Image (cartoon, rainbow, N blue to C red):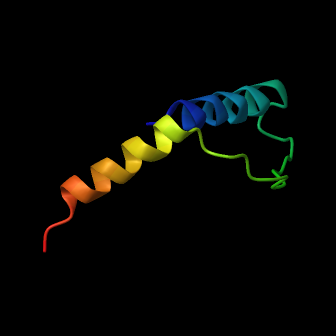
Amino acid sequence: MSACKNIWAHIFSSLRIMTLVSGQFSILFKNYMPCPNNVAEGVIEKVKADKVI
């Protein structure tokens, strides 16, 4: 599980506990952020390596 998913899982769990499972919340997409070059290059290399023709 990615770090981002772990953070959101913790936030959702905490909100449920704080509201005794009766609270409501939602997420609204705000914007995209540029992907760092080293991360993008790593993803591209992994996809190329996994690609079977």
- The percent position of residue 44, horizontal first and vertical second, equals 37, 53
25 left or right of 5?
right
- The percent position of residue 7, horizontal first and vertical second, equals 63, 29
Q: If the image is split into quadrants, where does the C terminus sit?
A: bottom left
34 left or right of 2?
right
Task: Classify residue 6 by image quadrant.
Answer: top right
At 74% from the left and 52% from the top, the residue drawn is 32
Q: Is residue 43 above or below residue 18?
A: below
22 left or right of 42?
right
At 86% from the left and 41% from the top, the residue drawn is 23
- The percent position of residue 47, horizontal first and vertical second, equals 30, 56
Q: Is residue 28 above or below residue 13?
A: below
Question: Farthest bottom residue?
Answer: 53
Task: Classify residue 21 by image quadrant.
Answer: top right
Question: Farthest left residue?
Answer: 53
Q: If the image is split into quadrants, where does the N terminus sit?
A: top left
- The percent position of residue 15, horizontal first and vertical second, equals 78, 31
Camera-side residue of 48 and 2? 48
Camera-side residue of 5 and 48? 48
At 82% from the left and 25% from the top, the residue drawn is 18
Camera-side residue of 40 and 31? 40
